[in-house]
Image (cartoon, grey):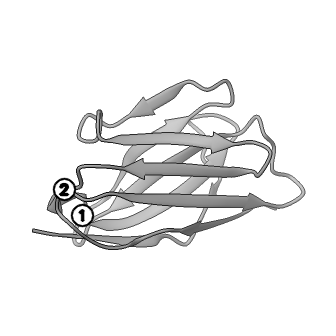
Amino acid sequence: QVQLVESGGGLVQAGGSLRLSCAASGRTFSSTYAMGWFRQAPGKEREFVAAMKWNGNTYYADSVKGRFTISRDNAKNTSYLQMNSLKPEDTGVYFCAAGPDLRRFDYWGQGTAVTVSS
């Protein structure tokens, strides 16, 4: 089993920055897993934000390209999402996910809330 715990959410003004962290643990977690971030705004469906494969390749939603950066520290089994130039539309609950590849995010965290005020 794999456990994912997010942290770093909070309230920030538009234009500000936050860094989210996702710590993975569990006997079955592998450093070869893809790790990703998704978000769900109030009243909306959960949507993809960013992902990173084990080889370092990164993928971003068009809405966050140039503002968000995903990274990982394999030694710590931790993924990070650096969010800059935040906008009110970035508000939502951010979820960390991990899995064997980008089409199989088998494990999910509980989420951390991000609120961007205008």
Residue 15 in the image, given as x and y percentages of width and height: 19, 56
Disc 2 to disc 1, C-alpha distance: 23 Å
Tell me the quadrant of the picture where the N terminus can be found: bottom right
**For the point 56% across and 24% down, which residue is it?**
57
- Left/right of residue 52 with respect to residue 13 in the rendered view: right
**For the point 45% across and 58% down, which residue is it?**
19
Which dot, 2 or 1, sits closer to the camera?
2
The residue to which callout 2 is attached is: 15
Residue 5 in the image, given as x and y percentages of width and height: 63, 68
Residue 61 tag number = none
Q: Tag 2: residue type?
A: Gly
Badge 2 marks a residue whose secondary structure is loop
**For the point 42% across and 70% down, which residue is it?**
9
Q: On the image, which quarter does residue 41 sit in?
A: bottom left
Q: Relative to 12, does residue 86 appear above or below in the rendering?
A: above
Number of marks drawn:
2
| Label 2, residues with CA under 10 Å away: few <14, some 14-19, many ≥20 | some
Whichever of callouts 2 and 1 sits on the residue coming sooner in the sequence is 2
Residue 12 in the image, given as x and y percentages of width and height: 27, 70
Residue 44 tag number = 1
Q: Nearer the viewer, residue 89 or 116?
A: 116
